[in-house]
Image (tube, rainbow, N blue to C red):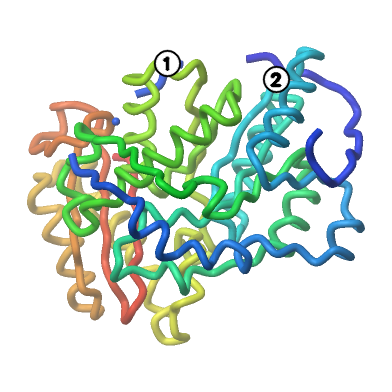
Amino acid sequence: MRRLFGTRVPFALAGPGSQPDSKRAGRRAPRLRGIAHFCETMIEIPAAAVLARNIDIVQDVGSLRARLAAWRRTGEAIGLIPTMGALHAGHISLLRKAKRYARRAVVSIFVNPAQFAPSEDFAAYPRSLEKDMALIEAAQGDLVFAPCVEEMFAEGFATAINVAGPAAAGLEDRFRPTHFAGVALIVAKLFNQCRPDFAIFGEKDFQQLKVVERMARDLDFELQILSAPTVRETDGLALSSRNIYLAAEERARAPLLYAALSISVSAIKEGVPISRALELGRAMLNEAGFAVDYFEARHAESLKPIALQGDGPLRLLAAARLGRTRLIDNLAV
């Protein structure tokens, strides 16, 4: 895809204006209605902060579509970076990659209740919209779409997407059985609302990336799905908005997840049987006090279990808990 060059122009701050590779889903409307009261706190934007910025912020689908339609009329390519906010350098790397391929980059910020189970951290999930806006502006983003729950899931909403394939691989889905149905639903809505030329997802959530690729292919969305490498701290810990949950002592141990994956990858490359290499990684984490959910070798495209290195491209994926924080990571072999 060619890059479209041009100078960046500040806009008024109020609306109106691939070939990609995706069973569980339920009716989300009752839960969505139950958490709709988070809408205002999730998107409240201080007026002074908004006026100080050269980036447009829209909060409804009509204003979003009007802005994007104007760009399309002038032939400008559009990239989409879906996020739940609480942005860090990993998210910004996606935005910068989008700007290499397209004249316009849209960042969506929406803490999606459909992908949280009732026992998970929807209410506590970090929200920092003003800081996020500053980061997006500094990275030359062009538009922030920050809808509330009621904009995305109106009263009476009763539609779900059933996902299988990579979404039923026995990894994250084994511990969060409704998660990927919620992810697929919100991503499908964003694709329909934005109609971007491409969307970018990070490889840290590798199973999610494969679910989105499969869903986009199966539903014939006219866009490309791009991916970007995991961004890490200097000690190897994968950046995550949930890392703020780690206590100081837990933060010191957290990089061992990456270390265990790295050791297992090296062992496989040296000819150690996959099963033995995985045992090494699990043992390392158990000894360090992690509660391991999974530490597995999978086919890098289908996410099916793989026993021999020659059986296809290989990816190691892991999830483990330290205290109340759940960490996920993965590495290619």
Q: Residue at x 16, y 34 (%)?
A: 309
Report x, y in % for residue 104.
74, 29
The mark found on residue 19 in the picture is: 1
**Mark sitting earlier along the chain (2/1):** 1
Res. 35 image quadrant: bottom left
Marks 2,1: beta carbons within 8 A: no
Report x, y in % for residue 166.
24, 35
Q: Residue at x 58, y 54 (%)?
A: 148
The mark found on residue 77 in the picture is: 2
Judge the density around disc 2: few (<14), some (14-19), many (≥20) Cα neighbours within 10 Å: many
Label 1's element?
A: loop
Q: Residue at x 27, y 33 (%)?
A: 300
Q: CA distance from mark 2 to mark 1?
A: 17 Å
Judge the density around disc 1: few (<14), some (14-19), many (≥20) Cα neighbours within 10 Å: some
The quarter of the rendered structure image containing the C terminus is top left
Residue 270 visible in the snapshot: no
Q: Nearer the viewer, residue 199 or 42?
A: 42
Residue 53 located left or right of residue 70 = right
Label 2's element?
A: loop
The mark found on residue 219 in the picture is: none
Amino acid on which the number 2 mark rests in the picture:
Ala
Report x, y in % for residue 37.
52, 67
Report x, y in % for residue 218.
32, 20
Q: Nearer the viewer, residue 280 or 140?
A: 140
Residue 190 located left or right of residue 17 = left
